[in-house]
Image: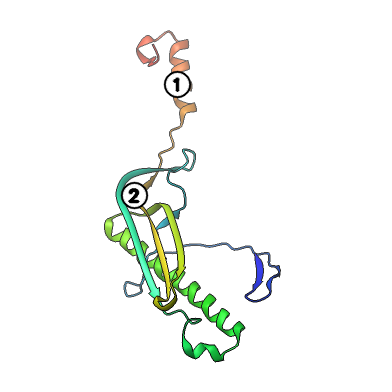
Amino acid sequence: FPLYDTLGGVRGELGLSIKLNFIGDVNPFRDSSAGVQLFPFSKLDGNSGYTVSHVFGFVEELVVADDPEFEWSDNFNQARASHETRQTLMYLLDAKVRRRMCKKVLEMGGNAVLGYYQNFDMEGDSGLVARTYGTCVLIEKKEIVDIASSDQGMIKAAASGDDDHDERA
């Protein structure tokens, strides 16, 4: 990951390795949308191990917040503090809009979003606007069929001359 200074640009790099173990969402009072997967592509790869079992439709969310760089009181602050405040706000808006959309997905009965897209608009006096949208779907793991063992059974039946067990004939 690049180390980014809001005024000076890229200042270095940071290498990171993370391992996550999802235990579960056991607190019913927490504002959570755990378990929803977001995919930026519109169709799942056939080798992914998942298949789309139901398409619920379009899902979207929008969150608006005041832009700290547009407020009149901010004119007296240093540029660096103003940029860092905006970066922090965008980070928080990112999480908030994603969580709200994922809660909608869970309410619709889905567990994933295909074609996930998110963007930010700086709209001056309206503030910062975070938008996200995609297609709510229900995905399931594919069942893995052991083709090798079923082929061996058919070969043994064919070798013994038993045509009743040969499903290829």
Q: Separation of disc 2 and disc 1 at Cα? A: 35 Å
From the image, tell me which residue sits under label 2. Answer: 138
| Residue 78 image point, x, y percent | 60, 87
| Residue 81 image point, x, y percent | 58, 85
Vertical arrangement, residue 4 with respect to residue 49, above or below? below
Tell me if 110 is positioned left or right of 10 in this view.
left
Vertical arrangement, residue 82 with respect to residue 60, above or below? below
Question: 105 or 97, which is in the foreground?
Answer: 97
| Residue 47 image point, x, y percent | 49, 39
Q: Residue at x 36, y 54 (%)?
A: 111
Residue extending farthest top:
161
**Disc 2 to disc 1: CB gap under 8 Å:** no
**Res 153 label:** 1
Mark closer to the observer (2, 1): 2
| Residue 49 image point, x, y percent | 46, 42
Give the tally of numbered discs.
Answer: 2
- Whichever of callouts 2 and 1 sits on the residue coming sooner in the sequence is 2
Quadrant containing the N terminus in the rendered view: bottom right
Whether residue 59 appears in this view of the structure is yes
Question: 4 or 14, which is in the foreground?
Answer: 4
Describe the element under mark 1 as helix, strand or loop: helix
Q: Amino acid at mark 1?
A: Gly
